[in-house]
Image: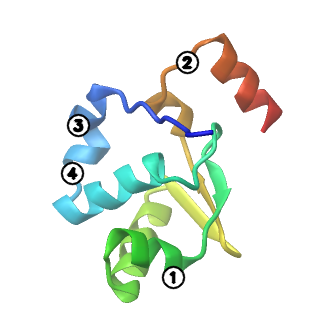
Amino acid sequence: MAKKRYIDTKFWSDNYITELDPLERYLFLYFLSNEHTNLCGAYEIPIRIMAFETGLDVDMLKKMMTRFETDNKVIYRNGWIVVKNFIKNQVLNPSVIEGIQRE
């Protein structure tokens, strides 16, 4: 079954997002919408897959992820990523809320 991720249009005017450079915005949007995501924003994904899917160099990817960690927006440990406030960028309805609780 295909997954759909809806990104709130306010994403682009979020104070944090407006301070990022274009590649950082692209990576952050990738974290919210790639095919590995789940409803709660915590999922397993190797760096090499992120690099392949985004086309970003591994070193550049790690540098940007370090900034996101420093800014307390994304955590990456042992192949798992957690996007803080992931849910605020999603459309919430009863079935989505039930799915988040299941995850």
Disc 4 vs disc 2: which is toward the camera? 2
Looking at the picture, how far across and down is residue 2, in whole percent?
56, 40
Q: Is residue 79 left or right of residue 59?
A: right
Q: Are marks 3 and 1 in contact (CB under 8 Å)?
A: no
Element under disc 3: helix
Label 4 neighbour load within 10 Å: few <14, some 14-19, many 20+? few
**Mark 2 — residue?**
92
First in sequence: mark 2 vs mark 3: 3
Q: Counting residues from the N terminus, which is met first, the one under dot 4 or under dot 2?
A: 4
Return the residue nearer the eye: 77 or 46: 46
**Mark 3, residue position:** 12
- Residue type marked 1: Arg
- Percent across and percent down for residue 35 are 52, 53
Q: Which mark is residue 14?
A: none
Name the mark nearer the viewer: 4 or 3.
Answer: 3
Q: For the image shown, how many numbered marks are present on the structure?
A: 4
* Coordinates of residue 81 in the picture (x, y in percent): 61, 61
Q: Secondary structure at mark 1?
A: helix
* Circle 4 residue: 19
Residue in front for this viewpoint, 83 or 50: 50
Identify the amino acid type marked 4.
Glu
Q: Residue at x 81, y 32 (%)?
A: 102
Q: From the viewer's perspective, is 94 left or right of 36?
A: right
Mark 3 or 1, closer to the camera: 1
User: Residue 68, image x and y in percent?
Assistant: 43, 62
Q: Quadrant of residue 78?
A: bottom right
Report if residue 90 is visible in the image.
Answer: yes
Residue ranking furthest to the bottom:
59
Q: Which residue is mark 1?
A: 48
